[in-house]
Amino acid sequence: MSRAWLIGAGPGDVELMTLKATRALAQADVVLVDDLVNPEVLQFARADALVVHVGKRGGHPSTPQAEIVAQMLEHVRAGRSVARLKGGDPFVFGRGGEEQQALHAAGIEVEVVNGITAGIAAPAAIGIPVTHRDHAQGVVFVTGHSAGSGEPDWRALVATRMTLVIYMGMRRLNDIAGTLLAAGMAADTPCAAIESATRPGQRHALAQLGGLADAVARAGLGSPAIVVIGGVASLALARAAANADAAGAR
Ligand code: SAH
């Protein structure tokens, strides 16, 4: 019987993919691959699998969501097993929820295989834990790209005093930082932006909230990147300072 999976490929580093993900991938006749998926993960797919890139990076036009779902339905109905590969976790800002709904509506069961989301992996890649008893009692994953569901209530988020982990926030970073400052967040709140985390091109910038947008612009960071705002980011700052000291002592 044909099967359908929504698989999280993790943040980039192939070794951060789950065993379950690699096993599901190895069973698929068709693999529909998203933008942010590291192509190296396709080593786990069958050599004879049909691989379709549906992402907008790398010069391909983005495939509309309805078209992706239509392709999945077509293959499953033709008796082929389909793996839908997404960056990070399929249910964190990946539209996996929408695809699951559409498949369910068409009477097709879909198995979800979690992946490590960039919002945890990217901070960790530079030593930032998203929670820490001394700094934050919780973490908020939020999109900086407001399309679809409206603007997040940034003022309410500031009031939680939790770590803010912002996905898709680079283009509007200046606005977001300004809104957080206006909502009363301290200008010296530690922040980090991490681009292409867990990949060979990983880069980051550390700054205080008041200088975040400038620091990111100076470092020339762009998408894909995760922005971390809150006391936990000081743990990376401490490490970067220690590294600078070590370099100075050499
Ligand atoms: N489902 C994905 C998120 C998709 S939204 C997940 O769980 O990780 C796309 C956003 O994820 C990007 O704009 C960026 O904010 C973030 N992202 C994904 N991969 C990343 C990486 N390797 N490094 C930094 N940010 C990443």
Image (tube, grey):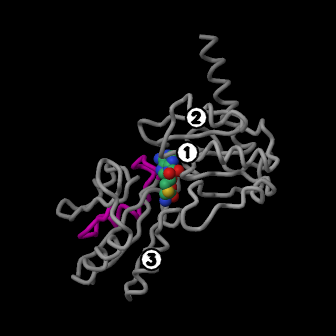
- Which x, y percent locates residue 155? 77, 56
Query: Are the residues tagged 1 and 2 within 8 Å (C-beta)?
Result: yes
Range covered by the magenta-colored residues? 11-33
The picture quadrant where one finds residue 144 is: bottom right
The quadrant in which the C terminus is found is: top right
Comes first in the chain, label 1 or label 3? 3
- Look at the numbered disc 1 and say if its residue's Cβ is closer than 8 Å to ligand 1: yes
Amino acid type at image mark 3: Gln
Q: Indicate the amino acid at tag 2.
A: Val
**For mark 1, what is the residue?**
170
Query: Disc 1 or disc 3, which is closer to the eye?
Result: 1
Residue on which the image places disc 3: 100
Q: Position of residue 122 (x, y in %)?
A: 55, 45
Q: Residue at x 49, y 43 (%)?
A: 197
136 shown above or below 201: below
In front of the other: 146 or 163: 146
Q: Which residue is mark 2?
A: 216
Instruction: Residue 18: say if magenta.
Output: yes
Q: Can residue 116 be spotted in the picture?
A: no
State the SS at label 2: helix
Where 221 falls versus 142 (above or below)? above
In this view, the residue in front, 214 or 102, is 214
Residue at image coords 29%, 48%:
59
**Mark on residue 195?**
none
